[in-house]
Image (tube, grey):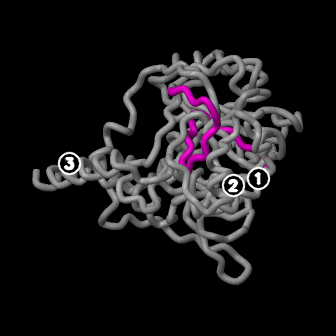
Amino acid sequence: MVRLDGTTDTGQTVSDARRASRTRTGDRMTPIPFRQTPEMSGPMPPDRPAFDAAEVRAVVERAATDPDGAYLGIASIPRRVHALRATLASLQGQATHAFVYLNGYDAVPDFLEDPRITVFRSQEFGDLNATGKVFALGHVPHGTLLTADDDFIYPANYVATLEAAIARYGGRVAACVHGSIFPDRVEHYYLRTAIFAAQQALPQDRFVTLPGTASLAVRAGVLPLELDAFLPETMVDLTLAILCKANRVPVVAVARRAHWLQNIDRDGLYQMFTRARTHHAAYAERHGPWGFDAYRDAIRSLPADRADPQVDAAAFACAAAGTVPAHWRESATYYLLKAEQARAADGARAV
């Protein structure tokens, strides 16, 4: 599997406190400390305690005993404790086991005292923010790996639907609910050629570039999900997009009815960053281009039934014909939004 630095190393050590990007020197991996560039905004990632990844793996493997199981990763902060309870209750009976990462909790809530739940805490492993949702998943040896957020109440057929979507494409896709498509070159992170929002109806699957990890599923072993495979700041969605692209694993937003996921309101990052050139954009640019040509061969090689009414037939047809699906193209609306964001950014700089 290809990691963010382009190597295929699968070492398990995650004690580097910076979760550094890595490059190969001879037969060993050399950490490259993260450095901000002038165009990036946002704080430097905090240092984290070193820990023994082998011990974490042992804990995870003791919990993940069913080879056909569905294993969930989710992270939380104290003010979201009631939402966490509701989210986990909606997934009860669907996930074989849940790995819950608690950032900043003084104590473990009583409702997490359950043999089907394993808790990891920031006091031992550092405050990982949303990246905590993948903390354990890289150590699960089999089954389906799922990420969730305490933004949502999940439907009773949530896990089965995502597993069925993965099976439709022969097992080598990442399935999500919320998904969007970057332009070929990313100038503003939140500017997309298409967005299939989590609460939006989608009559058939659509291939996308950026999954929303509030609703993601992939089979174990398809992607490198160890913690040190992830970017050094909280960019879980973008990291998964980069890893999928590097490993030729297409991302598919699944067909569903409107409001299939029930939203639990909270303040989001979208409003904070839509008018700024964020560090996300700089990372996305570095790992481009993101156009359909970057995915064409991987999509074309999938063993899906092209006649299945749920599959993204337009993408398969375009992959074979050398053309681009309509929702991957930079439309007139896209260019209007791009101009609006450019004006907003100029105004912010003037202030």
Q: Are marks 1 and 3 in contact (CB under 8 Å)?
A: no
Residue at (19% x, 51% y) in the render: 343
Residue at (34% x, 45% y) in the render: 333
Residue type, mark 2 in image: Ile
Q: Nearer the viewer, residue 90 or 250?
A: 250
Residue with the most extreme front position: 321
Q: Which mark is residue 302?
A: 1
Name which of mark 3 and mark 2 comes first in the sequence. Answer: 2
Indicate the position of residue 48 as horizontal and vertical percent values. Answer: 53, 51
Q: Secondary structure at mark 2?
A: helix
Mark 3 = which residue? 344
Q: Are marks 3 and 2 in contact (CB under 8 Å)?
A: no
Q: Are marks 1 and 2 in contact (CB under 8 Å)?
A: yes
Cα distance between the residues tagged 3 and 2? 36 Å
Horizontal relation, residue 117 to residue 186: left or right: right
Residue at (49% x, 21% y) in the render: 263
Cα distance between the residues tagged 1 and 3? 41 Å
Indicate the position of residue 265 as horizontal and vertical percent values. Answer: 43, 21
Q: Which mark is residue 299?
A: 2
Residue type, mark 1 in image: Leu
The nearer-to-camera label among 1 and 3 is 1
Q: Please state the extent of the stretch shown in magenta in the rendering.
A: 200-220
Q: Is residue 180 in the magenta section?
A: no
Name which of mark 1 and mark 3 comes first in the sequence. Answer: 1
Q: Which mark is residue 110?
A: none
Q: Nearer the viewer, residue 319 or 11?
A: 319
Q: Is residue 218 in the magenta section?
A: yes
Q: Residues within 10 Å of mark 1 (few under 14, many from 20)?
A: some
